[in-house]
Structures are given as structure tokens and as C-alpha cells.
Amino acid sequence: MSTTTATPSAAVEPIFNTKPRGLWSTALRRLFHRRSAIIGMIILGSLILIAIFAPVLATHDPTKSLIGIEDVQKRAAPCIHLLGCPADQPQHFFGLDGNVRDLYSRILYGSRLSLMVGIISVGFAIVIGATLGAISGYMGGYTDNLVMGFMDILLAFPSLILAIAIVTVLGPGLINTLLAIGIVSIPVYARIMRSSVLSIKQQDYVMADRSIGVPSGRILFGNILPNALTPLVVQGTLGIAVAILDAAALSFLGLGAQPPTPEWGSMIGQERNQVFTAPHLIIFPGIALILTVLGFNLLGDGLRDALDVRQRS
Amino acid sequence: MGSYILRRILTAIPTLFFISFVIFALLALSPGDPTGNLPPSLPMEIKQRVREALGMDQPMPVRYVRWLQQFMVNEPLNAIEKATGIQIGNSEDRLRITSWTARGKPVIDLVMERLPQTLWVVGLAYLLSIVIAVPVGVFAAYKQNSTFDSISSVIAVIGFSLPTFFTGVLVIQIFAVWLGWFPSLYNTTLDVTNWDTFVQQVKQMIMPVMVLAFFQIATVSRFARSSSIENLRQDYVRTARSKGLGERMVVMRHVVRNSMIPVVTLIALGIPGIFGGAIVTEQIFAVNGIGQLLIISIQSNDLPVVQTVLMIFAVLVVVFNLIADIAYGILDPRIRYS
């Protein structure tokens, strides 16, 4: 605005001398400037690697008892040769569990389950919840009242209690836990999506599309949905943490993954009375679970700060 | 204000009916059977008679209406009778929801036996978490980016990453086994009659309350912090400062009051959630509360108990929603008229 040249384009040019960046690349750069987000990403990165390479890293079969194969006691303490454990004893990094299985291998394989439970159940909830929320926000009126009324009722239940009710009906098991936690999380995403859609619907570019006669479906999926993604991504990351915790709690109560599946929650649940005699059976799965959940929470927190449009302006 | 409250109550009623139907239908679909726990050698006709006696041969809608009548009419009537001692109608013939496993004991009696323990532990944990979390959150917001803020943020993030079933087991190991400060098991037969038993009761409640409260503190303090930060930036805070109000006054009167509106919702809506957490904590500390009852009933397929306990949770949810709405109306007059 400082120059008053005849051609407006020449005056505008110097203002835009920096290359415009998209929301996501800006967010990514901001994400790498936050210590907590970096820690979260490191934790999750290593976790994904562990999950992928579990068969390579594991020293034993996670579900096979070592009775009669090795000369070992059940619930034996960790034995690492490098740390002074006698070389004639078989090596078990995290010790053995109550069924004489190698705890280290079980924990490695457990990362696969926890990641799977978290990502699939939240993915399921986001797909269904976001679709319902988008339709409800875009259509408004009767549909909106019906869908959101139902969502409010679902939301009214504490997630763990509703998940327990669903598992009661479906029967205990890992797949049913997945489904239960997925169903329980739907309303959160539906609500977020609906409120985003409601505000985006009023934007000029949507009005413009509508006025030139673009069909509703294309406005919704081409214009509104991509712009409503940010809060979903943040909530989804934090939601994975909650889903993993809930699934572990269900397994702890004996309603989730069934033995001999190497699930962290059920590992703690089965051995919780042995905390006095064999604390390693509680502590190692517990730490694995905490690190995983912490990773998603830290990343989610970082993402929220990085993507928060209000804070940027 | 009156019409606002009335409107809220009127919308809560259909919600409650809908929830009750969902709970009933959901569990009616599950494969539970009242004769499942009877010896398999029992003749089929007898099992059939048991089912008929419990009304299981009736179609689902009939069963739903009868269950609803028992839950919403018969049991409250019984409760009134018990409290006042006045007999209403022929209470001997009144149908009650009975457990399938606990020798046909009425479910409400089972729940009533266990409710006090849950309420004590949950209530104390909740109170404690609010008393700690709100000042921490507000102070962290006021001193944004200070050492206190970062430390409390780190603790909060760790706080809601810790599974209660892990911290619970760990806390038992540390405080009950190593230090020997508290009993490792909850003595459920303890009657508080004098000072000694009171101390004992407090001692055994500390661990479950601590574990439950920690998780809650993490959530509420984060929320109070972000809500206060938003309000600290507002124009009216600057106005308050510029007209010469003391800092204490500015924070207490202008920031805290306005920041509490969303926090109150979170607190009210979180009460049912903490019951969910109590299910796990009760298992760990062997507290015989309703959470434990729920798990036992699920394991033994005692559907009437599961239905009733879930329904009680649902009623709690709706009631606390209502309280949150009303508190909202009191705190923020704008809401009443929208």
C-alpha cells in the first residue's frame, strides 16, 4: 500500500515475496519446533518400528510356554548376561511370566495389538462419526436433530461403561473390544465434524460454489470436508491414546483380549496379584503402555498447538 | 430462570426413556439365560418353568414395559415405604427386579448395599481433584510459560497417560507393601463407630481416592488452564486492570468466574466418567462397590443386575447433565434466554 503505481499488480508483488505455504506444511514445521511433539514422534516412531520388526527383535515365541524346553522357573526375574546374570542361565531380558513365557517377546508383540486397537477403532469411529456429523451439519433441520440427538445419548455414557455394555452383548474378545471402543468414540467425531461444517458452510467460497450450481455432494466432499479435517486429526490422535487405555482396561478386567494373546492390559490383569513376588510382570507391560499412550498424547498436544488457527493469527 | 429449568427437565425425560430402551434392548439381545447357572442335569421342563416364572417367554416389548414399571414405579415405591414406614398398596405382591444368581435377591438391594462404598470413594476423589485442579490450572494460566506452568503441564500429560490399573497396582506395592502405611485390601465390613475405626476407614480410602483423583486432576487442571488463558486475554480484564483493580481482584472476580463456565460443565459431565474409572479401581483395591457388582454380574451373565446398574449410571448421567445446564444458566445469564 506504500506505492501508488498505475498497475495494481506491480504494487501487490513485493508483499507476496515469500512463497505461500499450505496449512499442513506450516503445521509440520511448527510441529518440529515443539519439544513435546518431537518426543511424542520419537516414541511413536520407535513403537511402529518395534511393531513391524517384532518377529526379528523377539527372542522367543510370545505365546509358547517354555516348560520342558528350557530349565527355567515360572515368574523368574529378568536375566541379562551383559548385566551380570550367570552365563549358564538362559537369557530373558524382562524375565518370565506365570505361564513360563518370555515377557520381552510378549511385550514386543503387544505393541502390535495396542497400535492396531488404537488406530483401527479410532479410524472406524472417524469414518462413521465424520460422515454422520458432516451430513447432519450440512443438511440441518430434522436430520440434524435426529442424528445429533442420538449422538448426545451415546456421548452421555462414560466410554468405559458403554464399552463394557457392548462387550457384554458381543462377548469378550479383541475384535469386539475394537468394535465397542469404535462405537463409543463415534459421537465425539460427529460433534466436531458437525460444528466445523456448520462454520465452513457460511464461508464465502462455499456460497460461491453453491451460487454457480455445484451439486451438494461435491460441495460437501470437495470443499467442506478437506477444510474440516484439522480438528479431526488432533482429536483423532488424542483419541487413539484414550482408545488404547480403554482397550487395555477392558483386557485388564478380562473382557478384552483373551489369553494367551500378548496384550499389555491383560498381562497386568493376569499377574496383578504377583506384584509382591514378581514386580517385573506388572512394571514392564505398564511402562510399555504408558509410553505408548504418552506418545499419542504428546503428539496430539503438539498437533493441536501447531494446527490451531487462532493462535497463529 | 424457572421456565429455563422446566424446559431442561422436560427434555431430559424423553432422553431417559430412550436410554432405558437402548440398554434394555441391547442386553435383551445378548445370549444370557437365567437357567445358565443351574446344574445341566436339571430337566428341560423345569428350566422352562424357571424362564416362564421370570417372564422370559414374553415378547421383548412386554418385558421392557414390565422392567420399566419395576424400575421406575415399584422400586421407588418400596424405597418410600422403607423410609417412611407407611405401607402403600399391597407391597408384598409388587414385582421387583431380581438377580438371576444371588438367590433371587432384588437387584436394588444388591445395589444399595454397595452404593455407599462407591459414593464415598468416588465423591472424595472428585472433590479432592476439583480442589486441587482448579487453583493449579488458574495459576498456571496466570503464570503462563513459567516453570510452574511447564511442570504442571508435564505432570498433567503424564497424568492422563497413566492407566489407573497400573498406578493402582504400583501404589499398593509402594505404600502398602514397602512402606506399610495403608492396608493393601479394603476392609468392607468396617463400621465407622468411633475415632479409631474412622482413622482406619480414612487410611484404607486414601489409595483408591489418590489413584482416581490423579487422573481427574490432570484433565480438569488442563481445562481450567486453557479456559483461564482465553479469559486473561479479554478486553474486560484489561479494563479491570486499567481502572486500578488489584491483581487479586482481577483474577478472582473477572478471570476465574468467567473461566469456570466451561469447567463446571466438564466437572458435571465428568462425574459419570469417574464411575467408569471406579470400576477398575474397585477391582484393584477390592472395594465392593457397584463397579465391582457390574463386573461380577457380567461374568456370571446376570443380566437384570447389569441392566439395572447401567440404568442407574444413565440416570446419573442425565441428572448431572441437567445440573450442568442449570449451573450454566446461573453462571451465564445469556444462556437462559437462547
Image (cartoon, coloured by chain):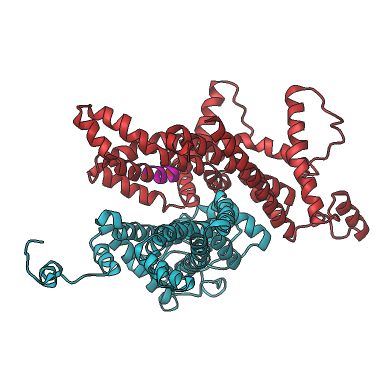
Chain colours: A cyan, B red
Q: Quadrant of residue A82?
A: bottom left
Task: Give how far across and how far down residue A290 sits, in percent.
Answer: 41, 57
Indicate the position of residue B22 as horizontal and vertical percent values: 67, 54
User: Among all residues in the image, which is located at the extreme bottom?
Assistant: A56
Range of magenta residues:
B215-221
Side (left or right) of B97 relative to A119: right
- Picture quadrant of residue A198: bottom left
User: Is the residue B289 above or below the residue A20 in the image?
Assistant: above
Residue A27, position in %: x, y? 28, 64
Residue at 55% of width from left, 58% of height from top?
A: A184
- Is residue A166 part of the magenta span, yes or no? no
Is residue B226 shown to the viewer in this render?
Answer: yes
Residue A281 seen by the camera:
no
Q: Position of residue B71 (x, y in %)?
A: 74, 41
Q: Residue at x 39, y 59 (%)?
A: A202
- The one nearer the camera, A213 or B185, is A213
Tell me the residue at 68%/52% (across/down). B23
Name the side, left or right, on which A252 lies relative to B154: right
Left/right placement of residue B215 relative to residue B201 reads left
Q: Nearer the viewer, residue B81 or B200?
A: B81
Task: Give whichever of A228, B187 is nearer the camera.
Answer: A228
* Foreground of the two, A236 or A149: A149
Above or below B223: residue B28: below
Tell me which residue sits at (27%, 27%) in the image.
Answer: B249
- Quarter-of-image position of residue B107: top right
Q: Main SS type for the magenta part?
A: helix
